[in-house]
Amino acid sequence: QVQLVESGGGSVQAGGSLRLSCRASGNIGRYRMAWFRQAPEKQREGVACVVTDGRTYIREVVQGRFTISRDTLRNTLDLQMNNLKPEDTGMYYCAASLRSISWVDFGAEAYEYWGQGTQVTVSA
């Protein structure tokens, strides 16, 4: 079982940037990892994913603005968010899975392990 701890959230104005980081208690190279977000009264949605061979996937809604990266030596997963928009506001979660680790999956049900989340607020 892996434990995940997110950090880096905060409040920024539209157009600003934030970098979220997720520290894992185990070897993240063994897991499919992803970042999700959840706005109030909305479903949790995946925004970025990295599979075990290092391939990364970014959802269209944040394509060109968000970048996901992992450091398998430090066991961290980062999400660089640029040109933030008010609609990016929400709680951001780091997630990990040992199932189907070579395949991208943006469904929340595909992940067994979750962090506690970090809040991102973007003002207009």
Image: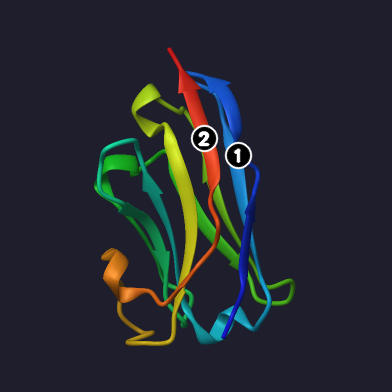
What scheme was used to colour the molecule? Answer: rainbow
The C terminus, quarter of image: top left
Q: Residue furthest front?
A: 41
Name the amino acid type tagged 2: Val
Horizontal side, residue 114 vs residue 25: left or right: left
Residue 120 marker: 2
Q: Position of residue 108 (x, y in %)?
A: 31, 65
Of the two numbered discs 1 and 2 on the same chain, state the one appearing first in sequence.
Answer: 1
Return the residue found at the far right: 74
Q: Residue at x 46, y 82 (%)?
A: 53
Disc 1 target residue: 9
At x 27%, y 41%, the residue is: 61
Query: In the figure, residue 65 lies in which quadrant?
Result: top left
Q: Is residue 107 left or right of residue 11?
A: left
Of residue 86 and residue 79, the one placed in the foreground of this image is 86
Near mark 2 (Cα within 10 A), the count class, few <14, some 14-19 or many ≥20, is: many
| Spot occupied by residue 75 in the image (x, y as percentages of width and height) | 68, 73
